[in-house]
Amino acid sequence: MNSRILVVDDSALSRRRLRQILEPAGYEVAEADDGLSALERYFIDKPDVVLLDLVMKGMYGLEVLAKLRELDANAKVVVVSADIQTSSQNLAEAAGARGFISKPFEKADILKALENVLTGARE
Amino acid sequence: MTLSSNPPVDAGRLQTALVRWFSELTHQGMFATDCSMRIMVWNRWMEVHSGRTASDVVGRPLYDVCTDLKIRGLDQHYEDALTGRISIISFGLHKYLLPFVPTNAELGLTAMPQSGRIGPLMDGEAIIGTVTTIEDISDRLANEAELRKQIDVQRMARVTAEKAMRAKDEFLSTVSHEMRNPLNAVLGWARILIERSDVDPAVLSRAVRAIERNASALARIIDDLLDVARISTGKLRLEMHPVDLSAIALAAVDVIGPSIKAKQLELRTRLDPKTPPVLGDQQRLQQVIWNLLSNAVKFTDPGGVIDLTVTRSGADARIVVRDTGHGISQEFLPYVFERFRQSDASSSRRHGGLGLGLALVKEVVELHGGRVTAKSDGEGSGATFTIDLPTVMSADVRHPQAEVDQPGSDLAHSLAGVRVLVIDDESDSRELLTEFLSKCGAVVSTVTSSDEALSHIRMSPLPRRPHVILSDLGMPTKDGYEFMRELRALRTDDGGAIPAVAVSGYANPDDRQRALAAGYQTHVAKPIDLAELSAALARAADRG
Amino acid sequence: MNLTALQQDALVEVINIGFGRAAASLSKLTGQRVHLEVPQITMCPLDELSEHLRPMVQNEVASIHQIFSGSVAGDALLVLDEHSAAILKELLTNEPAMPLQMDASAREVLTEVGNILLNACLGSFGNLLHVQVSFSVPHLTLETLEGVVSSVTVNREGLRYALIVHAAFRLKNSSLTGYLIIVLSVASIERLIRAIEQWEGGER
């Protein structure tokens, strides 16, 4: 079965670009454009990995991350964000993110990060 | 050096010469690198402040010469410059670009404060290197610090003024509140008396007593207000005499007694009879003790204890009022003697009063050359007020006027048994002189005019005749000169030879001459130095 | 000329990336975390710029102005109202604010911050377009909004557009807002939009 990825980003452009990278690589993609619908989708789609933006309207990405991990301690989240402050990376890591990719992202970085998380999960 | 007119100088060389001219002239540091970050230009300012000559550094990698740049992450700005970006290196965020010795030690900085720019060197569209400029902003910082200080001073002044304004507003509302209560009682009873045609004698007596009591309360409030006004304009006059603190403490206890009983408090007094007298205004000092006691009564709950102690403390006399009452919070303690201040606005409602008592205490005590302190271990643990006053025994009389006003001191000459006739048209002067001379032991008679004086002398039998006359010069109708001429015209048996001292406000040599010519033995100028006066009188009386 | 929703979305993302970089630089400089918010953008013909800004900025403003050139060329400004400028300076340097007119050091700090923000944003455009954009030295001025607007409108020929970016961020629990204004010729805008559309399709 193909791994399922939930892409959480308020930018349609980013979501489309991620889909263009993920689908050819054999992933199933679900999307959410804000924090609340991300939480909702997470429990409907039960994705294997969440790619999460930080700078979003309403619920900030770090909050979404905390909520997700609170509701599912095994949630695997990779942050994909333009907020590249060291403090943001540290906060994301402390909240349980499995990876941090800065925008603008490269196709190879995305795929490698997903692979790491997914193989790490199987071990 | 030769002027080369031939061949013509090309623009590039001219430009290079021009750049060198400006880079040596400028008051800024300037250096340039090529794209591989080798130093190409290093101007005079850089030589002076880095201590390294251009010949020493040109051609070497910038990061080798200025190792600090990489350590502080400033190399990023050179990377940016090589992509066409300009960086501002502000003092506010970086303090300096390169660690140079400060040029102004007063700023207290470890490195010269700098403002820098890093940018690309462009040759048309192409980036051919980087250029850095550095400015020493020591002077600017000093100016800004000065400005900031001035702004702070102004801000503080404004805050203080606003605070004073607020305190005054609060005070006014407290005063109105405090005055309205007794005033309402007075008006209320007065209206009852007006409206009722036949008033029961019991009611009448109650009404009159209530009116009297409340009017007195009003009078006391007004007295306090006037005292504060007098003190703040420097018009409070103290009548200085040797005062026995134990005696006035007892008098204050008498006054406060009923309220202590009414509130079921215990008052313990320890009045050391060996406490030396202080030089002061008896009425004011009594008011001080009364204020402290009434403050203690106000803030101590029933069952509490108030201690009043009067003792000697070194050369000073000490008054201590200690209570077991509410105490004073550490925050309020520094303000406890400030005028119009009460620990909170609501406490004036709970405890009544104007918040003036302690301010008056402090000011009166300080006018006496003494000091007052308040101590409290915080709210709920009582308060202790301590007053130290210089005594007549004090070696150092702290109050400067005390020396002058103090009749009992060595400075004043004894006039024991000397009969003095004082002639002065002003009652204040007469009283002052009488008071003082009596303290020196003189027997004083006073008259208000020259004619009165002449008839007093003529009519006194010899044993009652004054030994010496003290006369004012400036008097209406018959002045002091004319008086003296008439006196000296009398026969010796009639008193014509009684020695006399002139007093006048015109302290010029002419006055003195005229007074002596008129027949006075000596002349004392106003304002009167009492030591000088008593000495003059003693001398004059000896002669006579 | 109007931006489609897709173009608008793409532009926001590009600017977001620029702000992210600026925030990283600022936080490295000050040791403070900068909380970023999603920027809002509007585009209008240059002669309508002051109508658009007037409801949002009053009185005197501090503006940091920079001219950029390259295949996309124009003016870039960061506009802060006086209050935000004073707070920003205070937050960054921990020094009490003093009127900006008197405080050259504060003006310099604001110039540096403006420069970082403008460079990050325009740098994002540059990266996107794979072109080099070069910048003039930034200048800070304190003047009325009208003065700022007229400084970018006078002596400019041809139809120009202003991209207004409403930037909001939080620093030490203080909310600050500023306006980033990028003035571009029609040709530059078209180049920019085309680049964004290509960016979406292609890979970098």
Image (cartoon, coloured by chain):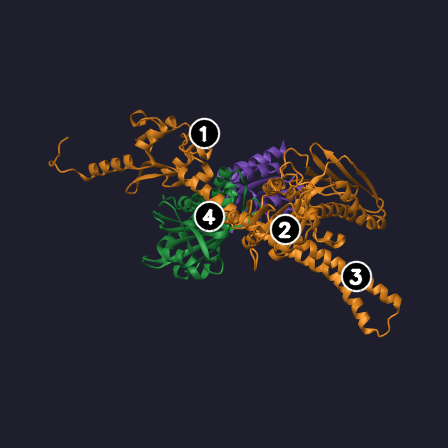
Chain colours: A purple, B orange, C green
Label 1 residue SS = helix
Q: Nearer the viewer, mark 2 or mark 4?
A: 2
Position of residue B348 relative to residue A106, above or below, is: below
Looking at the rendering, which quadrant does residue B111 occupy?
A: top left
Q: Label 3 is placed on what type of residue?
A: Glu
**Front: mark 1 or 4:** 1
Q: CA distance from mark 3 to mark 1?
A: 87 Å
What amino acid is labelled 4 in the image?
Answer: Val
SS of the residue at dot 3?
helix
Q: Residues within 10 Å of mark 2 (few under 14, many from 20)?
A: some
Residue wearing tag 3:
B212
**Disc 2 with disc 4 on a shared chain:** no
Identify the element where label 2 is drawn.
helix
Q: Can see residue B200?
A: yes
Height in image: B264 above or below B7? below
In the rendered structure, the answer to whether residue C71 lies left or right of residue C101 reads left
Q: Secondary structure at mark 4?
A: helix
Residue located beneath label 1 in the image: B71
- The residue tagged 2 is B494
At which x and y percent is residue A36?
A: 62, 50
To which residue does mark 4 refer?
C14
Residue sitting nearer the eye, C200 or B417: B417
The answer to whether residue A53 is left or right of residue B447 is: left
Q: Quadrant of residue B325?
A: top right
Q: Residue at x 35, y 59 (%)?
A: C159
Residue nearest the observer in this picture, C54 or A31? C54
Same chain? Circles 3 and 2: yes
Disc 1 or 2, which lies upstream in sequence?
1
Identify the amino acid type marked 2: Asp
Q: Callout 1, which amino acid?
A: Ile
